[in-house]
Amino acid sequence: MNRSVWKAAFLATLPVLAGYSAMGCAFGILLDANAGLGAGWSFLMSLTILSGSLQFAAVEILNANFPLYKVALLTFFINIRYAMYGFSLIERFRSAGWKKLYMIFALTDETYALQVENKTPDSNRSNDYCFAVALLNQCYWIFGCLLGSVAGRWMDFNKKGIDFAMTALFLVILTEQCLEKRNRLPSLIGGAATLLCRILFGADRMLIPAMVLMLTGFLILRRRLEDGETEEARR
């Protein structure tokens, strides 16, 4: 890959650097404070899992001693959206050679957004650009997690509330989506499914049923959701 591709990828991922460093730092601190695991485990999890939502959930999983089947189900439903992202990139990744395997593994929300936007300076190097974006973003995430692990282990400060960092991020995203008319239905489905499962199953057992119910609702209303997106785009 030439220098122009790396430069374009770096400039495009600068906002991700800021976000991943902060969120990764929160995860590293939380992993040390709640699970007693240091920088080595933080690095290993960031290297092999590369999913902020799942890594934050993993802290609770480690403390709760979940059975394996629950861990598998939780992992599946948290990360199923990445498979949906991948469908739109199948043709682009097809000619990527060995890079394809890593780009599939490293597909996150932010990486997907940048790869779809595709600000490569050379259209013939699209796969190189996508690879660079994925690699840089993972490096940012690993850096943030390691920084948080070191801070959590060696700095004495009040860590209360750090576990709310990922929730706060999704609340900000939800608020932004609710302000857009076309995105209100998915938000309503998610909110209704969560509330219903909270009532039926309780706080400790609601997560997997809620995610199953959300996915079912999205599939049933898929055509309506797609029609809404098309109508909004015409405006």
Image (cartoon, grey):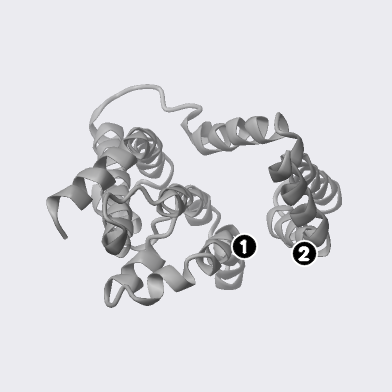
- The residue carrying pointer 1 sits among few (fewer than 14), some (14 to 19) or many (20 or more) residues within 10 Å by Cα, namely some
In front of the other: label 1 or label 2? Answer: 2
- CA neighbours of label 2 inside 10 A, class few (<14), some (14 to 19), many (20+): few
Amino acid beneath label 1: Phe
Mark yes or no: residue 202 visible.
no
Task: Identify the residue shown where x is 70% and y is 50%.
Answer: 204
Going by the numbered disc 2, the residue's amino acid type is: Leu
Asked if the residue at tag 2 contacts the one at tag 1, i.e. Cβ–Cβ closer than 8 Å, the answer is no
Residue 148 in the image, given as x and y percentages of width and height: 30, 37
Q: Is residue 178 left or right of residue 154?
A: right
Task: From the top left corner, tell me how far across and down residue 234 is, in percent.
Answer: 72, 44
52 up-or-down from 180: above or below: below
Residue 126 placed where, x, y %?
Answer: 32, 60
Label 1, secondary structure: give it: helix
Residue 25 to residue 227: above or below: above
**Front in this rendered view, residue 15 or 53:** 15
Q: Mark 1 vs mark 2: which is more N-terminal? A: 1
Q: Which residue is mark 2?
A: 219
Quadrant of image for the C terminus: top right
95 to the left or right of 235: left
Which quadrant does the N terminus fall into?
bottom left
Q: Residue at x 55, y 71 (%)?
A: 68
Q: Say whether residue 224 is left or right of residue 133.
A: right
Residue that numbered label 1 is attached to:
77
Kind of element beneath mark 2: helix
On residue 169, which mark appears?
A: none
The quarter holding residue 16 reads top left
In whole angstroms, how far apart are the C-alphas of marks 1 and 2? 14 Å
Q: Quadrant of residue 227?
A: bottom right
Asked if residue 198 can be seen in this view, the reply is yes
